[in-house]
Image: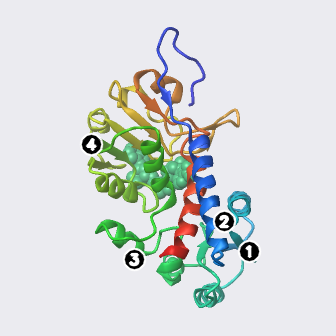
Amino acid sequence: MCKEQRRNGEKMPQIIDGKAISAQIKDEVKEQVAALKEQGKSVCLAVIQVGTDPASSVYVGNKKKACAYVGIESLSYELPEETTQEKLLSLIAELNGKEEVNGILVQLPLPGHIDEDAVIRSIDPKKDVDGFHPQSVGALCIGQPGFVSCTPAGIIQLLKRSGIEIAGKECIVIGRSNIVGKPMALLLLRENGTVTVTHSKTKDLKDVTKRADILVVAIGKPGMITRDYVKEGAVVIDVGIHRNENNKLCGDVDFEDVAPVCSAITPVPGGVGPMTIAMLMYNCLHSVLL
Ligand code: NAD
């Protein structure tokens, strides 16, 4: 699916460097956390994992590592798979009440017997560093301050810090999930883009996506977006993360096919991926300031 061949003689676009930009954001957060410490204030994130899903364990481990790097204290709650919803909600209620805990993160997905929406709703919106609480989403929708989902917030930073203007641009988002597609559309709108959201029921997807100056792809289908979906000179942001048949990471965009026709593109790995944790650190810092 993710082709390896490169067409001879075709020019390559600006490669948007998520590794460098995320490192820059983490360093900025680190500096501000240190400044808060000098005023006697600390930042603390509680991370809850239910069960031992290996992918979740890797994500949780990376989040704790990032906390250690920027100087944010992390409290770890590793609960067994069979934990009841009641028990999880009571832990969250306890953490909501602890003044020294600034952010609460529940690693998703949760085991099937737990209602994820009920868990998300139970987190105090002031500590909702993932930005998934309905109050955070509502605030984003009406332009009020609040936490923003980390992946789309990271994409706005990638664009801005790569010198790509959003205002007035035709922005097309493929995918309408609550954690990526929908908040992405709202953020692009907040930046004065002209925004269209497409999804699995969109008719003539290629005709729509070919209008995009900025195309954000969050579908969950490896290599689906080829150059037939992309306007010459577009900026292409690939949110997808998959392992291909050779166990190599690849995205929803067929990078080798699309890169020569666009003006800028995010690679996988090293594009959107590292931004999510950097923005989580940013949200944790801001949980103290809210
Ligand atoms: P999701 O499955 O919740 O949503 C996928 C969306 O794509 C849906 O809205 C659906 O309507 C749309 N879609 C599916 N097939 C389509 C088609 N043929 N044409 C048009 N639209 C179609 O996925 P998600 O949580 O939004 O994640 C999308 C991808 O991004 C996944 O690969 C996921 O692993 C990745 N992801 C990466 C990060 C990161 O940090 N880089 C974070 C979140 C998600």
Label 2 – label 3 distance at C-alpha:
30 Å
| First in residue order: circle 2 vs circle 1 | 2
Q: Which residue is mark 3?
A: 135
Residue name at image x 50 percent, y 47 percent: 220
Residue 111 in sight in this render:
no
Image quadrant in which you'd find residue 279 = bottom right
Measuring from the top left, give residue 202's x and y in whole percent.
29, 46
Q: Which residue is mark 4?
A: 203
Label 1 – label 4 distance at C-alpha:
45 Å
Residue name at image x 34 percent, y 40 percent: 165
Helix or strand or loop: what does disc 3 sit on? helix
| First in residue order: circle 2 vs circle 3 | 2
Label 3 – label 4 distance at C-alpha:
32 Å
User: Tag on residue 76?
Assistant: 1
| First in residue order: circle 2 vs circle 4 | 2
Circle 4 packing at 10 Å, graded few (<14), some (14-19), many (20+), is few
Circle 2 packing at 10 Å, graded few (<14), some (14-19), many (20+), is some
User: Tag on residue 34?
Assistant: 2
Circle 1 packing at 10 Å, graded few (<14), some (14-19), many (20+), is some
Residue name at image x 54 percent, y 80 percent: 119
Dot 3 and dot 4 residues touching (CB under 8 Å): no
| First in residue order: circle 3 vs circle 4 | 3
Nearer the observer: mark 2 or 1; the answer is: 2
Vertically, is 162 above or below 47?
above
Vertically, is 7 above or below 138?
above
Residue type at the position of mark 1:
Ser
Residue type at the position of mark 4:
Lys
Measuring from the top left, give residue 200's x and y in whole percent.
37, 49
Helix or strand or loop: what does disc 1 sit on? strand
